[in-house]
Image: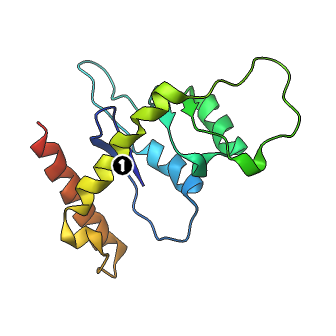
Amino acid sequence: MLATDGNGLPIGLVVASASPHEVTLAQETLRTIAVPQKRGRPRTRPRELVADKAYDSRAFRTWLKGRGIKAVIPHFERRARKKPKRGRPFAEPTLIYKSRWKVERTFAWLQNYRRLEIRRERLLTTFRAFVRVACCLILLKHF
């Protein structure tokens, strides 16, 4: 799991096995974010989270709302309600969601490193170290 900023540069990372669902890892990934500021403590909460349909969960949305993070996640059609909800109509997050390609570009940058393309390491700590080195190289290229 990888969290990126608005330019597609990695700011948060969690490496785990393939068995847990993405929603459970998303909370842990968001806890790893610490963006340094000019003064004061580092910023740990993004203003908004852009994610795909796999993260559409009522529990995850309430967790984000409790932390003050705006969720830009499209609804999964199979779980959509048959009757429209009362109140404010739902607006499709088109403009903000269109910037999600930057996250996919970051994953493509990580795939440029052959060691990460196919996971050959048995130990999770070894693979995590290689992913962190690749993220550092990506950051060095862009600064």
Q: Nearer the viewer, residue 24 or 37?
A: 24
**Disc 1 residue type (three-letter):** Glu
Residue displayed at 53% across by 46% down = 52
Residue displayed at 27% across by 23% down = 37
Residue 109 as seen in the image, left or right of residue 58: left
Element type where label 1 sits in the image? helix
Q: Nearer the viewer, residue 128 or 48?
A: 48
Residue 129 as seen in the image, left or right of residue 97: left
> Which image quarter holds the N terminus?
bottom left
Residue 69 as seen in the image, left or right of residue 126: right
Residue displayed at 68% across by 35% down = 62
Q: Nearer the viewer, residue 6 or 26?
A: 6
Which percent across, then down, holds residue 128? 30, 65
- Its colouring scheme is rainbow
Which percent across, then down, holds residue 61? 65, 37
Residue 129 as seen in the image, left or right of residue 31: left
Q: Residue under label 1, please give it.
A: 104
Which percent across, then down, holds residue 129? 25, 64
